[in-house]
Image (cartoon, helix red, strand yellow):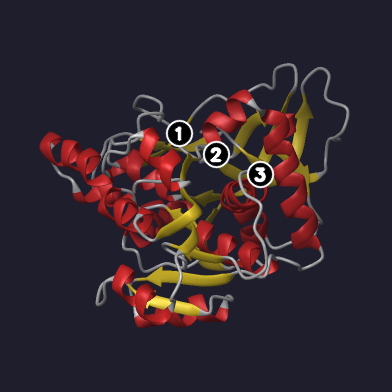
């Protein structure tokens, strides 16, 4: 089979090669999927720059999700059948014509579901669902701040928070993205490149924020935490600011940018800091991942959530796809087809 292999870090146009490799064989509890398309996530960009600790050593096959048909089943898999079309979370290995995954990380999808929509469900919507429905209990009127609200997870978070009746503040880096953020359901869209989001939110709202969803990390995380009131929570699920740090000193600076919080101060202020890493969830609680995936597939099937596909590429265009995602100009899900 062919697989897109990360052979060097750095420039997207030079980082990948399409190589022939051995087709994987599913072990007990796994399934093998003939891949129709796979998705990109910002963690892939960070891995391409050699800054993602969990990424496998080079040469590596990246990829967190695929959509395709089940080719074969490992021993003990009974809830799925060969030939069914599925979307699946993969612990790397998704950039290939065939991929194996834990059967609990796959869910059957309609034959006519758009591949890009199905891909968005596996990682981005599962992440958002876990944040909103597993880690929190939101109420109508709760004020939430979503950073990178035009991105894949940001799109999903906005739709899920809207579903709960929240007042949504979303940040984006261009006027085009602000228009997209508003069209997706946010009441307030803030351009973080031209205004200070803390100052802007305080102009709009007279009370503190209830929940902050942060994918940037660093100073953005620290500033977002300052907006929380009693009972407020900030959920960190990324550290995109690390791409701006070119040296070891910059990386250390990022840690300082997050700020240091004594648990006693959190207790006294009645605030919470929550961290989300779906790789850890999939490793240790595959039943939770399965529950999240089944929920978002069900909602998408009846159009209660509507993932947005912001870019479609062919496997031969992997460098272009990566560069587009890294440019911060994309919205929603980026997909790559074989």
Mark 2 or mark 1: name the one nearer the start of the chain: 1
Q: Please name whichever residue, 165 or 264, is drawn nearer the observer in this view of the structure.
A: 264
Residue located at (34% from left, 52% from top): 221
Between the residue at mark 2 and the residue at mark 1, the CA separation in whole angstroms equals 7 Å
CB contact under 8 Å: marks 2 and 3: no
Q: Nearer the viewer, mark 2 or mark 3?
A: 3
Report the residue marked by disc 1.
61
Q: Position of residue 188 (x, y in %)?
A: 47, 79
Q: Please name whichever residue, 249 or 25, is drawn nearer the observer in this view of the structure.
A: 249
Question: Splitting the image into 4 quarters, where does residue 112 fall?
Answer: bottom right
Apparent side of residue 318 relative to residue 262 in the rendered image (left or right): right
| SS state under label 1 | loop
| SS state under label 2 | loop
Q: Nearer the viewer, mark 3 or mark 1?
A: 3
| SS state under label 3 | helix
Report the residue marked by disc 3.
134
Question: Splitting the image into 4 quarters, where does residue 104 fall?
Answer: top right
Q: Position of residue 310 (x, y in %)?
A: 51, 68
Between the residue at mark 3 and the residue at mark 1, the CA separation in whole angstroms equals 30 Å
Q: Residues within 10 Å of mark 2 (few under 14, many from 20)?
A: many
Report the residue marked by disc 2.
94
Apparent side of residue 73 relative to residue 259 in the rendered image (left or right): right
Look at the picture and state if 180 lies above or below 297. below
> How many dots with numbers?
3
Residue located at (42% from left, 47% from top): 269
Between the residue at mark 2 and the residue at mark 3, the CA separation in whole angstroms equals 26 Å
Q: Residues within 10 Å of mark 1 (few under 14, many from 20)?
A: some
Mark 3 or mark 1: name the one nearer the start of the chain: 1
Question: Splitting the image into 4 quarters, where does residue 59 fall?
Answer: top left
Q: Please name whichever residue, 250 or 53, is drawn nearer the observer in this view of the structure.
A: 250
CB contact under 8 Å: marks 2 and 1: yes
Residue located at (72% from left, 53% from top): 296
């Amino acid at each position: 089979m062919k697989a897109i292999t990360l052979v060097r870090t750095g420039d997207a146009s030079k980082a990948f090669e399409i190589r022939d490799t051995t087709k994987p064989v599913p072990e007990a509890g796994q399934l093998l999927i003939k891949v129709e398309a796979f998705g990109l996530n910002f963690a892939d960009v960070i891995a391409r720059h050699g800054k993602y600790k969990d990424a496998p050593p080079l040469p590596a096959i990246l990829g967190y999700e695929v959509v395709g048909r089940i080719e074969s089943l490992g021993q003990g898999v009974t809830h799925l059948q060969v030939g069914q079309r599925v979307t699946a979370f993969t612990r790397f290995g998704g950039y290939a014509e065939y991929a194996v995954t834990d059967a609990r990380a796959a869910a059957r999808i309609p034959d006519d579901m758009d591949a890009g929509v199905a891909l968005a469900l596996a990682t981005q919507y599962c992440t958002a669902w876990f944040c909103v429905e597993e880690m929190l209990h939101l109420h109508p009127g709760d004020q939430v701040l979503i950073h990178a609200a035009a991105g894949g997870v940001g799109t999903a978070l906005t739709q899920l928070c809207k579903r709960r009746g929240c007042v949504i503040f979303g940040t984006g880096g261009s006027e085009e993205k602000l228009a997209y953020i508003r069209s997706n359901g946010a009441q307030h869209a803030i351009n973080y490149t031209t205004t200070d989001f803390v100052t802007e939110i305080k102009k709009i709202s007279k009370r503190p924020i209830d929940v902050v969803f942060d994918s940037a990390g660093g100073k953005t995380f620290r500033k977002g935490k300052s907006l929380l009131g009693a009972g407020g929570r900030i959920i960190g699920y990324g550290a995109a600011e690390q791409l701006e740090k070119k040296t070891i000193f910059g990386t250390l600076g990022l840690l300082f940018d997050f700020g240091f919080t004594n648990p006693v101060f959190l207790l006294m202020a009645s605030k919470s800091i929550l961290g989300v890493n779906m790789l850890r969830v999939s490793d240790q609680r595959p039943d939770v991942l399965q529950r999240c995936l089944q929920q978002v597939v069900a909602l998408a099937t009846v159009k209660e959530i509507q993932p947005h596909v912001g870019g479609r590429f062919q496997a031969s265009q992997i460098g272009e796809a990566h560069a587009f995602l890294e440019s911060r100009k994309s919205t929603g899900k980026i997909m790559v087809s074989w």
